[in-house]
């Protein structure tokens, strides 16, 4: 560009941009620094930020097409390693980093993404224990969300058929790793709930690397598990590490086989338990029967004591005894009175006028009254004379007074 030529600002910026973009050293650069002034532009989906160190800073942008591949969300004060290119934003005449990829400095991207999502969902109470639903004791239908070709489904089938063959297994086949796995898993969980197709769900897969298990760390899966009205057992095949799905589920199992054991009861244990219950019931019935029999005997004994017939028999005996006492008393009384009567009769007989008459005496009566003197008599009166045998009607011819 010749000296003395007057340039527009746009031309100058465009020229500087062309120089920078022609420098192959600036087309792929790796930069380490700290994020500040981070902005997530929700309308466009682009990330805007400043990358700085102790002495300098540079503006940076990460377009949506690039940041969609990130497993974590950039944050202020986060140390990162950036892969990108340097160019100029013509409008402002400012050179900046155009980021193609980003990794946390010192911490893996997946680990950071895991912790970020865990913290976010925990703050929403998606992992709270009071949200956990109990696993049904005797499920009739066990839903399984896993790969149809993996070892997980074979292990689940073997365990369920051995432990509780009455349960029906319903498989909704999904991809358990790869770009579309999380969407398929969440859709399968939603489908089971919509159709009410199971009493309990087993969601998981066999073991693998962190990257292979990552579908079970996706937010869409965690939210589908937490929202499920059907109790969910998380069965991602890893013994020690946890996935986000484990935290959101109602119950976590270390392996698919363990999940199957948690989902259904053991028929042999149930048989032993039923036998124990039958023995306890039989024993309880025997004890109760013996107790009630004893009570019955006591009641029968009490009934015999309180039987009206026994009471009547007792009263009858008492009446008989009273009658005998009264009869004896009456006989004694009559006998006493009879003796008294005989004595009185003897006295009466001794004093009887008839006895006197039998010795030759007689009784004179006038008008039915005995005459003891002559005061009431006059010559010519009619009197009756009672003899020992018979009587005489007489007339008074003369009256003689005693001197």
Image (tube, rainbow, N blue to C red):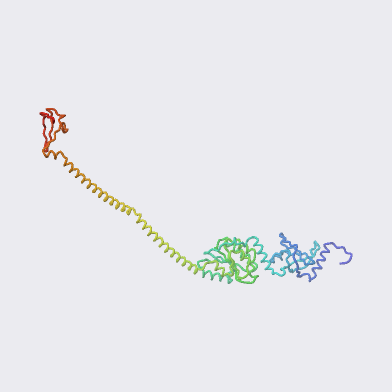
The answer to whether residue 354 is left or right of residue 222 is left
The answer to whether residue 284 is left or right of residue 322 is right
Query: Residue 31 in the image: x percent, y percent?
Result: 76, 69
291 relative to 108, above or below: above
Q: Which residue occupies the foreground of this view, 280 or 119?
A: 280
Q: Which residue occupies the foreground of this view, 53 or 113?
A: 53
- The quarter of the rendered structure image containing the N terminus is bottom right
The answer to whether residue 113 is left or right of residue 14 is left
Q: Residue at x 10, y 28 (%)?
A: 398
The answer to whether residue 195 is left or right of residue 20 is left
Query: Residue 236 in the image: x percent, y percent?
Result: 60, 69
Q: How many marks?
A: 0
Q: Residue furthest left?
A: 397
Task: Write down the quadrant of residue 177 in the picture.
Answer: bottom right
Task: Write down the quadrant of residue 91 in the picture.
Answer: bottom right
Query: Residue 333 in the image: x percent, y percent?
Result: 24, 47
Q: Which residue occupies the foreground of this view, 145 or 1?
A: 145
Q: Residue furthest top?
A: 379
- The quarter of the rendered structure image containing the C terminus is top left
Q: Residue furthest front?
A: 403
Query: Residue 55 in the image: x percent, y percent?
Result: 80, 67
Q: Residue at x 24, y 48 (%)?
A: 332
């Amino acid at each position: 560009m010749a000296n003395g030529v007057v340039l527009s600002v746009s031309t100058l910026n465009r020229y500087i941009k062309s120089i920078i973009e022609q420098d192959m050293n600036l087309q792929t650069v790796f930069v380490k620094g700290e994020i500040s002034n981070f902005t997530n532009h929700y309308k466009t989906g682009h990330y805007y930020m400043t990358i700085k160190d102790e002495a300098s800073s540079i503006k940076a942008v990460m377009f949506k097409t690039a940041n969609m591949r990130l497993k974590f969300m950039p944050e202020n004060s986060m140390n990162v390693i950036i892969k990108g290119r340097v160019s100029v934003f013509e409008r402002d005449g400012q050179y900046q980093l155009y980021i193609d990829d980003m990794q946390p400095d010192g911490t893996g991207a997946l680990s950071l993404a895991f912790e970020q999502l865990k913290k976010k969902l925990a703050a929403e109470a998606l992992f709270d224990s009071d949200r956990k639903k109990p696993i049904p004791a005797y499920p009739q239908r066990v839903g399984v969300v896993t790969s149809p070709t993996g070892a997980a489904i074979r292990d689940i089938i073997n365990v369920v058929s051995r432990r509780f063959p009455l349960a029906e297994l319903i498989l909704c086949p999904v991809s358990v790793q790869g770009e579309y796995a999380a969407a398929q898993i969440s859709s399968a969980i939603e489908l089971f709930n919509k159709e009410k197709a199971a009493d309990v769900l087993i969601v998981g897969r066999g073991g693998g690397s962190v990257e292979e298990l990552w579908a079970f760390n996706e937010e869409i899966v965690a939210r589908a598990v937490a929202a499920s009205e059907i109790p969910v057992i998380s069965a991602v095949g890893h013994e020690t590490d946890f996935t986000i799905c484990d935290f959101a589920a109602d119950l976590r199992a270390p392996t698919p086989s363990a999940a199957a054991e948690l989902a259904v009861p053991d028929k042999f244990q149930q048989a032993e338990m039923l036998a124990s219950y039958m023995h306890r019931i039989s024993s309880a019935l025997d004890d109760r029967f013996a107790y009630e029999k004893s009570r019955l005997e006591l009641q029968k004994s009490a009934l015999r004591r309180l039987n009206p017939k026994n009471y009547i028999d007792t009263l009858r005996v008492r009446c008989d005894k009273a009658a005998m006492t009264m009869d004896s008393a009456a006989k004694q009384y009559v006998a006493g009175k009879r003796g008294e009567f005989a004595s009185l009769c003897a006295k009466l007989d001794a004093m009887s006028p008839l006895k006197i008459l039998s010795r030759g005496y007689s009784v004179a009566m006038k008008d039915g009254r005995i005459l003891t003197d002559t005061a009431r008599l006059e010559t010519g009166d009619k009197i009756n004379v009672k003899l020992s045998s018979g009587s005489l009607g007489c007339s008074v011819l003369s009256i003689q007074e005693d001197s």
